[in-house]
Amino acid sequence: MSKINRRDFLKVGAATTAVAACPGVGSAMELKLGGEDFHQIRTFHPRARAPYLCTMCPYFDGGYTYAEDGEIQKVEGDPNHVATRGKFCSKGLASFFGASDPDRILAPLKRTGPRGSGQWQEISWKDAIAEVAGKVQKALDKGADTVHLNEGAFKDGGTVRFMDTIGSSSVIRSRFPSINNAAKQAATEKALGVDFVLPDLEHTQYVLNFGSNILETAAPLAQRLTDGMVEQKLKLITFDVRMSHTAGRSDEWHPVFPGSDGIVALAMANVIMEKGLADKQFIGYWTDYTTDQLAEHLKQFTLKKAAKASGVAAQDIKRIAIEFAKAGSGAVLSQNGVSYHQGGVDAETACLLLAVITGNIDTEGGNCLPRKFNIATLQPAPEPKGSAVRKLNHSFPFEVKEGARKVEVLFNHMSNPAYSSPAASVWREVLKDEKLIPYIVDFSPFMSETSELADIILPDVVGVERDDVASSPTALFPWISMTRPQFKPRGRAQDVRVTLKKIVEAIDADGSKGMKQYWAFSDAKTWVKKQIEATEGIDKKKTYKTLKKKGAWPSYGKIGPGGRKIVKKKEVIEAEYNTFHTEGLPTPSGRVEIPLPSWNPNPRLADLKPGEFVLSTFKVAYQSLSLTANLKLLSEMWHSNPLWINKEVAHKLGIEDGALVRVTSDVGYLVTKAWVTQGIHPQVVGISTSVGRSAYGRVAQANPRAHAPFAHEEQEDEDIDHNLWWRDGGTNPNDIIPIALDPQSGVQAWNDTVVKVTPAESGDKYGDINVDNAKHLAIYKKSLG
């Protein structure tokens, strides 16, 4: 932390006088859009700047780090980045604090007591590599697939390559590497051949939003939605079970019954076809159906059925459908509120159909095909094994417990299933059992709920310390961004790619096993350089040099002074549309291959008894599961998660605002506080994720005395010791959420959990959680049919 001495104080006075004498200088600094930063006292003393790629989410926003006195002091968006345009969300702005986190793991740790006992010993990297390599080699002797990887990164990297190298296909994931979740990916890949469509929000006239909350969870899209509101005066209609930030900024919010978005969308499509408002030319040329065939199929989805299922008035559904079709341009948003139900793929397909029948595919103001660079894989590359597997990890602990998986070694990377998975209590039970999983390796830089149950922790670096490169389809122009670290990692933390390289070299020292050849890079910087230079569509002479200096490539221009347009040589750079008209879509037929839509109600939700509710979990702007858990700047703003409950319903149940309530599912209950509001459907209760921690650090646990036993004295932080003013750390709902997999996508139907809500009982305390894992297992077995 920089200190102010007398000389600095005098310099401040001199600088202030200079600015007062030259007001043009001061105003020029104020008018700049960013791209530079200065010492907080010596205002003409610039801080060192380096490119930074934020990996807090799959949008991969590009910006800069600013350093002074050997530490990162600030990060911000790159003002000339075509996607971020100088803006970062709150999570991105706070991301650099992870590097100096006092609860961070800075050296390899080996367990010395029972799993979960918190007894650790620091060891050398040499000993750690030798031990892990020995365990992997023994496992390989029993079969490569006995080595498992639980992967949680937003993009593939060294860990999945390692699994390919050793020939193991036992890769499970907490997410797939895409902006979309698995259900929406399945819908868009089938229909359009891509895993994401970008709504052109800044140019559209009308937006239909089904269960998406982009104003809190998608900063690049939130910018463009705001631009569209201001510049285009677009109309935003949101269908969501609760009043999210996005719903609150909408022209209309319709609180739909959970899981009914699909039939609302199909009823709208039916109206559009009946009224002759569909784009017949687009349907006839680009789909497998005639307008008449599609219209006939859609007749079954009547306004009456949609109104009954959703609770949205039939006249509103009809009016909105007609408005959308007549708007001239329209975009459709949908996400977890639609996807995280049984039948999520069908519901997402129904939402996408609205864009298809109105011809709003890759048009100005419509839903556009993704523009991005496909970052190359390091060559030579091993034969795809684990990387070819698409399986989510939700059922893993049950499969291990039932003997369906034989595990000798489990690697865990950027995933915290002991906290964040459904039936998280089952994960903890299985991970703690050394007979089921003999050896667990975790790469976490922090002691997460999952890391606590590992046998050895090989601490990875954090985002600002990692050489990295990515491209994401968040703008109408493709881009690449990179991170160039300003400093070496703290302590003895080590990039996971380097760690895995050393493990491979220990297993295949002379290269005779054919593994070592795939790890022929000197360090992470070389890895990234080779990736960039092998990427198709780049300038092989200039791209890497430009990225090292500016952090983003290519340069399309600068943000114009009169608005949010990209300007180059005084001309506005316009995006291209209808990009598939020449060569077709990336589907087998080159056309839209959208299946005939369907919708089926969830019988359990349709049969709610009095006192039963559908539990909806959601994300907030300030937290991103474990990545943000120990960042004090963010947790000060959001550290507890009361249960949202409808005001009228709460009154009938005798529940006051702030009162303790018991939330009971089919497997157990939790005790939390009620937040009484009109902003939620009367048959729904809601609770946010990302808080309610039992590990990860003092901020995450809201306990300044919960010092990590492995932390060094120099890691202490007086701000946490003395200014962590809250003690309410929230309640984690995942223990009481049973597994419920959508058979089409394999995604957890997070928003299909049925619960009862009652006033707390005698003896209940805030934060109590009581579950029966035998009931979790019974539900899993029943789901197998």
Image (spheres, helix red, strand yellow):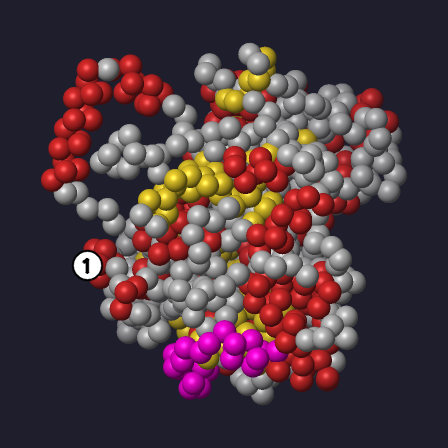
Left or right for 587, reference 746: right
The residue carrying mark 1 is 722
Residue type marked 1: His
Q: Is residue 638 visible?
A: no
Q: Position of residue 531 (x, y in %)?
A: 67, 48
Q: Which one is in front, 269 or 215?
A: 215
131 falls in the magenta region: yes
Q: Which one is in front, 741 or 623?
A: 623
> Dot 1: what SS?
helix
The quadrant where residue 541 appears: top right
Q: Which one is in front, 638 or 434?
A: 434
Residue drawn where x is 13% and y is 33% of the image: 10
User: Where does the C terminus fall, quadrant-wise?
Assistant: bottom right
Magenta region: 111-133
Residue drawn where x is 35% and y is 56% of the image: 100
Residue drawn where x is 65% and y is 71% of the image: 504
